[in-house]
Amino acid sequence: MNSDYRKANKLSDEVLLCAESIKSFPFSIEEVIKECTDIELVQYSELRKLGGNAEMIVGSKDGALHENNGRYILFYNEAMPKSRSLFTLGHELGHYQFGHDIKTLDEYKRNHDERFKELYDKCEKEANLFSAQLYTPYQVIKELAKRGCKITTEFLQEHFGVSNQCAKVRISNLCYQKNGEYDDLILAKFKQFIDTTAKRTSSFSDEFEREYEMQRLRESWN
């Protein structure tokens, strides 16, 4: 059961383009969720006020999306490092945008029923791909690489505000990225970010090494 890379990119791109709250990077994922969905956001501290163990109730120390009769609630641990919370919220938004069967995924997490393992793994990967594209769009990364930026996990963490996990997911999947229908629109919307970031980070030192890395990236995109 293969994960749908193209759909993950398309769904992420649509959020990037439609959300008025996304003007640059990093951005407030909470504002995006409020603007673009009917998901109710609930922090763990709110659960603790009711006297419950938030981690036990939600089933995760980071957060999770729950669905009940068409109502979606995203519980998240606001005490986690910001970059980690970002990835959690983006990941769960990915489940929502894909229309994944949240109840079946919850059932697998509780009981580890092997009948649902393949589906669970597929949905988890799709949610990760969605989150990585949302926070670090491959169109923007490719353009920055063309302008001389060295794309590393450290670079992505510094300029996009993502976690190490998200940065690794993005870099490991760059070679699978293909041109999409929204590429030009994405580049146009984030032109100022691209111009500013490339100007600030580009250097003519170590030119040979930079050209070598860029050639490797270009070959991976062919």
Image (cartoon, rainbow, N blue to C red):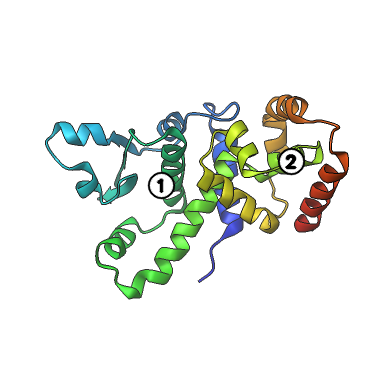
Mark 2 vs mark 1, foreground winner is 2
Amino acid bearing label 2: Lys
Q: Is residue 105 toward the left or the right of residue 180 in the image?
A: left
Residue 92, numbered circle: 1
The answer to whether one can see residue 221 in this image is: yes
**Label 2 crowd bin: few (<14), some (14–19), many (20+), radius 10 Å:** many
Residue 143 located left or right of residue 105: right
Residue 111 vertical position relative to residue 89 in the rendered view, above or below = below
Residue at 29% in and 34% down: 43
**29 in relation to 110, above or below:** above
For this rendering, which residue is in front, 45 or 168? 168
Q: Is residue 117 left or right of residue 25?
A: left
Secondary structure under the numbered disc 1 in the rendered image: helix
CB within 8 Å, label 2 to label 1? no
Q: Is residue 70 visible?
A: no
| Mark 2 element type | loop
Q: Is residue 108 above or below residue 177?
A: below
Compute the Cα span from label 2 to label 1: 30 Å
**Residue 141 % position (x, y):** 69, 41
The image shows residue 18 at horizontal and vertical percentages of: 56, 34
Q: Residues within 10 Å of mark 1 (few under 14, many from 20)?
A: many
Instruction: Residue at 87%, 39% (x, y): give it.
Output: 207
